[in-house]
Image (cartoon, coloured by chain):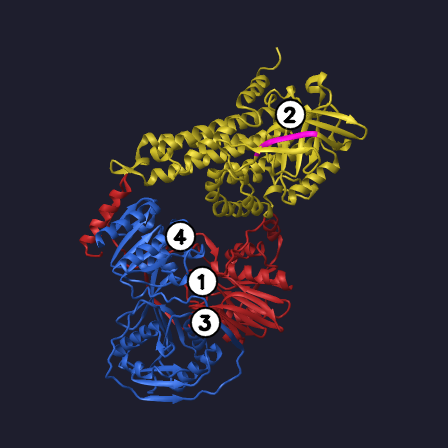
Chain colours: A yellow, B blue, C red
Amino acid sequence: MAFLINPEDQDLLDSVREFCEKEIKEQCKEYDVSGEWPAEIYAKAAELGYNGLEVPEEYGGLGLERITVAAIMEEFARADAGFVTTITASNLALKAVLIGGSEEQKQRCCDLLMEGNHGAFGLTEPMAGSDAGNSKTTAVRDGDEYILNGRKCFITNGGVASFYVITAMTDKSQGIKGMSVFVVEAGTPGLSTGNHENKMGIRTSNTCDVVMEDCRVPASAMMGNEGDGYKIAMKTLDMSRTWVGCGAVGIAQRAIDEAVAYGKQRVTFGKPILKNQALQFKIADMEIRVETARQMVAHALKLMDAGLPYSRESAIAKCYAGDVAVQNALESIQILGGYGYSREYPVEKLLRDAKIFQIYEGTNEIQRMVIGKSVIGKF
Amino acid sequence: MENQGILVYLESTDGQILKVSLEAMNAARKLAQLSGKKVGAVLIGDASAAAAAASYGADEVLTVAAHGYQPDRYTDILTALCERYDVSCLLLGSTRDGKELAARVAARTGSGCISDAMSMTESGAWVRSVYGGSLQETVSAKGKAVVTVRSGTFGKPELDEGRTAPVTAETVDATPLRSVIKDAVQELSESVNLEDAEIIVAGGRGMGSAENFQLVHELATLLGGVVGASRPAIEDGWVLRNHQVGQSGKIVAPKLYIACGISGAMQHVSGMSGSGFIVAINKDEDAPIFEVADVGIVGNVTEILPLLIEEVKARKN
Amino acid sequence: MELLVCIKQVPDDTVNVTMGADGAPKLDDIAPVVNAFDTYALEMAARFKEANGGSVTVLTIGGEGAVPALRSCLSVGADRACRVEEASVCDPQGTAYLLSQASKKAGEQPFDVIFCGSESTDAASGQVGAQLAETLGLPVITNVLALEPKDGGISAKQETEDGYRVVEAACPCVVTIVKPDYEPRYPSIKSKMAARKMPVAVLTAADAQADASKFGPEAAKVQRAAISAPPQRQSGVKIQEKEAAEAVRRAMEIMVGQKLI
């Protein structure tokens, strides 16, 4: 099964799949070991326009349907979850700008992505992950400028982005209502990046600290007004969660692909192991999970397309797909047995990659809070 | 030369007839036996191999003067001879040049052109590979034929030193050249005789790197064999292209073929499946190479090969 | 320069073709792709155009089913596409004849260089390019690795058994292309979407003023008597040991036993 895309777009998916097969899948194994950011692969992908898939047509994008982009993202994730993380993180930064930015900011960031650059979204801090209101980064107005100080951590694309969406407190006394958000371009004096994190998985994505030390930005770098930051950031995450779920679906699907390929040829007690009903049931359960997760992603996208509320569905899609990715990776390892545990085979990487999908862009606990609250309501 | 006979174009370098041209001669002899026709051989430019041509089975040798290889000139010459003697079948070795000349002469003479023949049936039809070697077709020309013969398929004809044949110098008028060879650069100085090798040790993508590929060289040298390769190893630049075995390389049939880190794509297998004994080493237990291997070792080739080299060394001492 | 690239759709050559029960190759389940050598030819033509100006037209013989192949060419460097609506072409010489006629109608201006792949991965005759040149009465350079304009004509690097030659020809001419030291480009999302909207011109044999008696079944100069799978080898023992040394020991035992070493 797959996302039900416009038949006309199938050729896009075919060409993306070919690129993933030939240029990403095998190559990323090596980078998974070294932890190096595969600049060459990203440069090739950028040339093919993979960084600008979500840029709206009115800002120079190609006007792809969301569902088509989702199918493409799933392909990326099937090939390598670090790769899709990089692309999704750029799009996360883009979404923030499209939600809260001025026309000028929107055009600038869209141009940067269409030219093959990356973006980064900086909300998380050492003491403010799920608890974003505890942010310590500050922005102090000084004439026509703001002076930013603080440290963001675990920022995807932190070391490779051309533009950063940075949240900072303009009025700490007001808590989340005192949070504002800025677009800061790479190269701005006072903005620097820390060391590349040595991560468990998604090792082909760049993750690092982004540090502001008396980083001066023009007042026009602020999106919206002072105090709009939290609202913009939350709206952005609401939307982006579905896309994170889409990446998780790709991992979960890859887990099935690998398990089926292995299980058909691995013979024990004189027959391929997939002739055993116990394992067929495992595959069936994996398929049930991935397909329901995929359709939840599709449903959330459909709500976005229709202009209807989607916060709850987006949270469900992310939370469920993240859990499914981990479960399917675990089952795939189990089906491959000792080989599944070996780094010679691709499935142990899937588990390492999958785990982050229960953590980033709102932990699955946060998602459950969102979902629970939306069901129960105020009482 | 008699009319409607068989003509073989013998390519030579430094007076030595190419082995694949001798294979074409062998095919011509077989066709002659079947049809009762005579076999003429033509040497263009350097005529010094005329005696050898007779010893290998030519009933008559034609020589034509030419100054260096120019495909336009050679096409003119072969076309003129085919027309002059109403040649029923022109045979050439399947070299790059041979294949170009064959196609062009066939177009000019209106002959059916058959490329890369691998064997001949009892009725004089030709068998050749299609679909990357996964299938074979048997084809024949409706009228006159131009056939190129794949190297490593027909074998050399028997050499009869006492055999002689009349040599006739032919003249073919020169016409202006439309494409001109200005320069030739030799890049591959070492000649690789895969076709005659008794042992071939071949490496593929699974070798992983140029350094690891040295293990293939080491084992080949130790066994007195020749180094072969599949296409990926050549494209990755680990070994020169004249080592290639398969559809776009050489067809080989050694007594022992050791395939190291070669997955076994049909394009490769069809070039080596005639080997006497095949040993395959591959870490993927599902690799198609194992389907043709007499002994398949499932394991990491960079781990297996050094051990195999040590074992061979130990036995040698 | 005006460049023409002749392409052929072939069954995906990474898939093994087997025989069907009807005695014909089973091709229905194999995805059609543009012949690999033709993709090299197109890439070389596209680079030539990008360096020297001009345009690239792709030409193929086939029905509606050939349109996706042409569109994929349009997404990786071709500017125009044309197909000859003709299903049955007898053999390489028939193909060369029909292409030669169509090449006179496929472009707005006459072509300066006609590119062909050196061979197709299915029939692998390697004849069409050279025969197309003969039919058109044009110079040909086969097995080309690289190409550049020179004195109004072209200079090509031709692959040989032991190296390469430098060959020159005046335009118009035909070149056949082997694998250069680069890969064909991937289509971008943008070029793929643009290719959907580009027209594909259609010529009938009559439009091309091609005489069916020169390319149809009766024109065949080569006929196929049979097609079959080659003899299969039987596989022997497969050694799977935890210890590599043990696997090597067992393999050696067999090889020595067979007096191979």
Q: Which residue is mark 4?
A: C15
Q: Which residue is mark 1?
A: C120
Q: Which residue is mark 3?
A: C93
Q: Residue at x 38, y 61 (%)?
A: B243
A338 over A39 or under it: above or below: above
The amino acid type, in three-letter code, at marker 3 is Gln
How would you classify the magenta stretch by its main secondary structure? Answer: strand
Pointers 4 and 2 in contact (C-beta within 8 Å):
no
Image quarter where the C terminus of chain B lies is bottom left
Task: Choose mark 4 or mark 2, whichever is in front.
Answer: 2
Magenta range is A207-213
> On the same chain: label 4 and label 2?
no
A82 over B273 or under it: above or below: above
Label 1 residue SS:
loop
Is residue A225 rendered to the left or right of residue B168? Answer: right
- Dot 1 crowding, Cα within 10 Å, few <14, some 14–19, many 20+: many
Label 4 residue SS:
loop
